[in-house]
Image (cartoon, grey):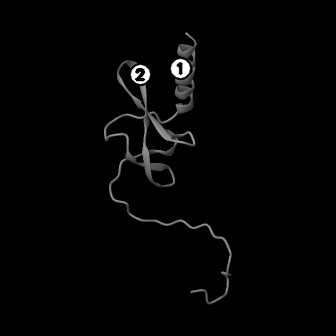
Amino acid sequence: ENPEGVLKPEMYVNASLRLDLGEVLAVPEEAVFRTGEQNIVFVAKADGLFEPRQVALGAKSERFQEIASGVSEGEQVVVSGNFLIDSESRLKGALEGMT
């Protein structure tokens, strides 16, 4: 209802909805590296290595992003410095391609 006539046709509005999604697997939003074509998180492996994983995303909150698939509960993901890890892996791939 709009008894005071504040809302008019073709107006735009920003709205936030709060709903309970139950328990989901989520990571801090900055842990997700968005390339435009895919969404990647870096998972910490043994000996200081990191594995890029393509993930499917679900709902997003103010600071967290739901991970629908691609990472399992208990795995450690990189929260900051993703672009440094990605840059290093791209550089290594380019150098390997040159030899």
Residue at mark 1:
93
Q: Position of residue 32 (x, y in %)?
A: 49, 41
Q: Amino acid at mark 2?
A: Leu
Q: Residue at the top extreme?
A: 99
**Cα distance between the residues tagged 2 and 1:** 15 Å
Residue drawn 57% across and 67% down?
A: 15
Image quadrant assignment for residue 10: bottom right
Task: Using residue 9 as the reference point, say whether residue 15 is left or right of it.
Answer: left
Q: Position of residue 45 (x, y in %)?
A: 37, 25
Residue drawn 31% across and 38% down?
A: 74
Res. 32 in view = no
Residue at mark 2:
49
Q: Position of residue 49 (x, y in %)?
A: 41, 22
Res. 77 in view = yes
Neighbour class for label 2 at 10 Å: few (<14), some, many (≥20)? few
- Which quadrant of the rendered structure holds the N terminus? bottom right
Mark closest to the chain's N terminus, 2 or 1: 2
Label 2 sits on a secondary structure element that is loop
Neighbour class for label 1 at 10 Å: few (<14), some, many (≥20)? few
Residue drawn 58% across and 13% down?
A: 98
Image quadrant assignment for residue 54: top left
Q: Amino acid at mark 1?
A: Gly
Label 1 sits on a secondary structure element that is helix
Please determine whether, in this image, residue 45 is positioned above or below residue 33.
above
Task: Using residue 87 as the reference point, say whether residue 24 is left or right of it.
Answer: left
Please determine whether, in this image, residue 42 is positioned above or below residue 7.
above
Q: Residue at the bottom extreme?
A: 3
Residue drawn 53% across and 65% down?
A: 16
- Which quadrant of the rendered structure holds the C terminus? top right
Please determine whether, in this image, residue 79 is positioned above or below residue 66.
above
Q: Position of residue 5 (x, y in %)?
A: 67, 87
